[in-house]
Every structure is written in structure tokens, then in C-alpha cells.
Amino acid sequence: MTNKPKVDSPIRGLVIELLNAMTLSEKIGQLSLVPGGGPSGTSELVDSIKQGRLGGILNEIESARVEELQRVAVEESRLGIPLLFGRDVIHGFKTIFPIPLGLAACWNREVVYQCARTAAVEAAAAGINWTYAPMLDIGRDPRWGRVAETFGEDPYLISELAREMVTGFQGEDLSEPDSIAACAKHFVGYGASESGRDYNTTNIPMNELHNVHLRPFRAAIEAGVASMMTSFSDFDGVPVSANHHLLTEVLRGTLGFDGLVVSDFKSISQLTVHGLTGSDRESAREAALAGVDMEMSSSTYEENLERLLTEGRITMTDIDRMVSNVLTLKARLGLFDRPHASRTHSRPVSPREHLASAYRAAVESVVLLKNHANCLPVDIGRLKALAVIGPMADEPYEQLGTWVFDGDSALSQTPLDTLQTRFGETVKIQYARGVPNTRSKDRSGFAEAVRIARESDLAILFVGEESILSGEAHCRADIRLPGCQQELVAEIAKTGKPVVAIVMAGRPLVLQTLLDRADSVLFAWHPGSMAGPALVDLITGEKVPSGKLPVTFPRMTGQIPIYCAHKNTGRPATDETYVHIDDIKRGAFQTSVGNTSFYFDAGYTPQFPLGFGLSYVDFEFANIRLSSAQLRPGEVLYVEADLTNRGTVEAEEVAQLYVRDLVGSVTRPIKELVGFKRVTLKPGETKTVEFSLTSDDLAFYNRNLKFVSEPGEFHVWIGGSSDTELRAEFELLAE
Ligand code: BGC
């Protein structure tokens, strides 16, 4: 689905007419996006609106106030220009879906679309007309708290989901009452914050910028995304909010983006803190000339653009260009015709329908990492006694995850709630937190937890990270289970009772201790409002796990960054060349352990690869075949395999397609995701999964940053995970 912005002539006419009528102060006002004042800031805010000194307000979500402020803008300002009302609506508004990393784990375009559509309907009903999503940063460092907000590590997966999220928020037409403008962020490279510490400098080679980091933004632009937010980060010495090359040459030029560019929160005034500029005036000039149209939360434009203009250091053409992008978005949103929140309600908001969508997303997002001796599913109704243990079992707020400003935790159904409601009458359910919260080192609750485990037939442990441990600025250098949860798991395992562990977390974790001790492990991210029903249905087998990892899980934190589409190096490790630290002979000669690319202590493979996820059934992929051994540009190559459900229940598998370009004018990744689809299979059923490839799917940016497909040999794989070995070969021919 694409929804490319059409700046048609009536909109252009309106914008020109307004620009001709506006004073300089009114123009500069349109470039200002300020936080809502709350009751205390009201009079100042209202005055600014009356004087036409504001273009938009963020974080004002009390609908009566939104309505009133919009009324002032339209009725009491000289030109009656309506306001943008922006808010971070990231993975739901009131009804909360899994965090974006969890949504990505569904590997389901439709689910992501539904999340955004549901959020748009709810947010629009509160008067919001602009969201700061989707976040399209590459998530290759799980220490980085914002990995929770990403769609994971892979540019193809992120791009596919970016399109859906943009379309979901913006609807068929931005001017529809329940459409809201999307904002792709953070342009560009923020995910590469060094050492996974938020806001840190990035170090991105040009080739990687184009082949990896820009790809999802290109997809969002193709889907018609209305706005872009600049990254906080430094890019090769020039912070992105002042980076003319990125914002003008690449974004406007190469990518052809014609929407609104907004700064991140105070990222323009922070240019002085970066050490790029010595004053706010210089920051305003750098950002304006680089291509930032609207300033979020700081006031360098408001305070300095007029002076810069009189000094001749920026021009009226620059200002008009910026203002025109703001006005065009307002016009595309239909705000000049229907400025008020009451432009919404094309149909009533249906909480039940929304919760059903959130439930489906939660079910599909959960990844089964381990299932020893088919410990799962469990027929809970047949147990005599069940122990529910852990700090995440009954946390209506914590299960929602990061960025849930408006999330209604009263809608949350926790796993404990659901278990008690469904089985409380027939099974003796005992509950102990074990630890006060996920970070706590207080072990005084262990004894009680061990006691109830001993008295039960099964212990279900809910461990992980509270919401606050991931998200913006919430980074961790050690990504094992925090607090003393590892010890809690070990104590419960010592009881000898079967242990099912559910991990709720905002990032991949290093899980070795848990994997060693629990019989089964489900990784649930932060599942959102419907965590309880989704998880209980998965535990009982009412639903079969089908989530797949959108990001590689390391064995140890020190392996980071570790991801699927890496380069081969000149000295790749193999099982034959790998030497474990315990196997090095005393006094070993320097080269006696070989010279290949691995860690003595962590090896060279991840704990779990991209795309990994078990099911309650065994799926078998076989007979990979190609429609031809050669692909000519302009033609289509079909790649097929047979997929069989070897289990006894119906289940869904995510079939994944990977390629490797063996020789490139720039080195190519050892395996790249290029396709995926969800397939439902009855017990014993075999289906053919078919993918198509064209030369465009194999193209990349070469040494001269030209997008080319180079003839040569390719490997292609189909499977249920990136470590699939079901491979075929073909040749891409020259034009
Ligand atoms: C974040 C953005 C967010 C903005 C507005 C910033 O701190 O980096 O992602 O949209 O705040 O809340």
C-alpha cells in the first residue's frame, strides 16, 4: 500500500496565499513546536497562539484543552491557521500493543498495520493529529534502551514494517478524520550510538549508511510518510540536526522526501552542547540551512531567525521553504477545513475490537526459545497446584513497556489475573513475587517462592525487566536478567519441579542461566494490555507460539554488536578453527590456536540467531527449487520449498528467504533477509512456500554509492530461521 503525498494545486495555492499574507513573525511562529503548558502555562500559551507565534503543540492530550487551543488558533489568531497537536503514539494509545521490537517479532505486516490503525483511531479521538512514529533506527545493540522502540536489526524487516505502520497511521488519506500524520525517526543513524549508550556519537561509513541505515527511511517515504524527525546524534562530526548533506542532499535529493522535517526535542539548542556552534543563533542558522523546518521544544528559531534574516545570513526563501512544509502538512491533514478534534469519530472507538487486535499481536510476538521434553504446552486444568512466581506476573503497568504515555493500565490483563480467573476454582494457585521488583537484590522473598514451588506440580516464573529499564536514555551495560532474578530462577529450579519461564523485557537479554535451569522459556518482550490472555493461551496450547526473533541474541554482552547480515571478514571462524579458552594448552605458541574471527570464551555464534523461534510442532522445510538457474534483469525468479507440519496440531510458521551475493564490488553480507511470509498448516499438511526475486531485490549501493545490481553468483536459502541450511544457487546475468 502506498500513500505518496500529493501536494496538489489547491494545497499549493493555499500555501502561497498564506505565505503572501503572513508577517515575518507569523512565519517564524509556524516553525515553533512547543510542549503543552498544562493549566499553569495556559495564558502564555494562549497568547502565543493568538499572536500566531506557534505552529504546533506537543504532549497536550486533554481533549477539551486541545479543542479550546485549536479554537483560539482558528478563531482568534489573525490568519486562523490551525495547530498541529503532536504526541508519541508509539505502540498504541490507550490500548497497548507489544513494544515495537515485539511487534517485529510477529513477522506479520498485517499486525503492524492494525497496531498503527488502532492507535490512530484512539489518538485522533483525543485530538492528536501527528504522531512521532514509526521509529526506524537499526537495532543492533541491545544495550541501547531504545532497541525496544526499533523493529530490530534487519533493514529489510524494518522497511517492510515501516510501510505498514505509516499506512496504518495515515490511513487511505491523511485528511480522513481518523488519520494522523506519521513521523519517521530518527533520521538517521541514531541506532549506531557507540557502545549502546543513548545519545552517543555514531560512526557510520557511507556505504553502511546507504545500504543499511537509510533503507527503512526510503521505504517510509515510498509509503508517503508525512514527516521526518532528525536524530540527536553526531554524524561524522556534524550532528544530524545541522547536517546539510544528510538533510538536504540525501533526504530531499537522493530520497526525494517532500514532507516536513522536525528536529528532535531541543536537538537544535543542543548543537552548542555538541560543540558544533558557540551560540543559539549559530545553531538556528546551521539547522535552518541544513534543512530542519520545525524546531521541537527549544526556541532558537523563534529568538534568532529574524536577526539572521536582517543580517543576510539566511534568506526569506529559506524561511518560506520551511514554513511552506509546515503549512502543507496542515493542509494535507485537512486542518484548514476541519481543525477540531471533532473532525474525528467517523466511527465509534471500539475498545473490544482494539483489545482483540492487541491480543493477536501479543500472541504472535512471543518467541519460544526452549522447550525441553515438550514441557509446554501444559494442561493447567489437570494440575492440582500451580506456583506463579516472579516480579512480572502481576504488573498491569510494567507489562506495557516503554512509551506508553497514554496507555491505560486499567485495560491491562495480567498473567496472574488470567490464570486465577480461568483456573482459580479448580487448581490451587499460589503466587509469590520472589523479589520486590526486577532490579531488586532483596532475597527475602525467595523462601516463600521456593515453598510454593515445592507445594506445586509446576512453577511458572515471570521474570525480566520493568518498563523503566528500556526506552529512551535507559541503557544497560550488562544485559543479563537484572537484580537477583538469576538466583531466584536457580533456587526455584533446585526444587526439581518443572519450571516454565516467561521473560518480559524491552531488549534481547543474555539468558544463559535461565536457559540452563528452566525447562521451557518463552520470550514475551513487553506484550502490552493483553499480556495475560495471550501468555496463558500460549502456555496451555490454546495458541501455538509463532514469534521469531527480529534481533540476534548474544551469549555474552561482550559479543555486541552481533547480527545476521554481517560481513564475512578475511578470516571467518568455523567449528574446525574455533578454540575454547579451556582448551588452550599452557604456554601455547601465539599462532597455535589459529587466526580466525572468534572469542575464546563466547565462540563466534549467537545464542539465538535472527528469525529463530520454536513451535509446539516440528516444521520441516525441504526441496528448495528455483524456476531457473539464472535471473535476467527485468525477469522474476521464483524460489520455492515444501513446508510440512510434522506435529499434531495446527500451527503457523514464518518462512524466511535469505540471499548471499558471493562477490560484490563492495563486500556483501554473509546472509541477507529478502522475504518472509506466515503460513498456517494443519497437522501433517505440506504446503509450497513461494517467493519471488528480481534484480532489484539484489541491488545495493556500490563504491560510488550508486544503486546497482551486479551480475554474479548468489546463494539463496529458505527456512524457519536465519541459520537455515536449505540452500540453492543461481546466477544474476548482466543487463
Ligand atoms: C525522543 C523522540 C520523541 C520526542 C518527543 C525525544 O526525546 O528522542 O523520539 O519523539 O522526544 O517526545
Image (tube, rainbow, N blue to C red):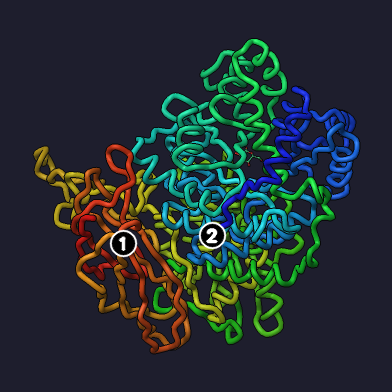
Q: Position of residue 709 (x, y in %)?
A: 28, 52
- Mark carried by residue 202: none
Secondary structure type for disc 2: helix
User: Looking at the image, is 185 positioned above or below residue 322?
Assistant: below
Q: Quadrant of residue 670?
A: bottom left
Rendered residue at 36%/36% (across/down): 206
Secondary structure type for disc 1: loop
Kindly identify the amino acid type of the residue bearing the numbered disc 1. Gly
Q: Is residue 470 left or right of residue 723?
A: right
Residue that badge 2 annotates: 102
- Pointer 1 with pointer 2, Cβ within 8 A: no
Rendered residue at 24%/68% (across/down): 727
Question: Is the shortest distance between ligand 1 and the CB of mark 1 under 8 Å?
Answer: no
Rendered residue at 30%/58% (across/down): 695
Gap between marks 1 and 2, in whole Å? 36 Å
First reached walking from the N terminus: tag 1 or tag 2: 2
Residue that badge 1 annotates: 634
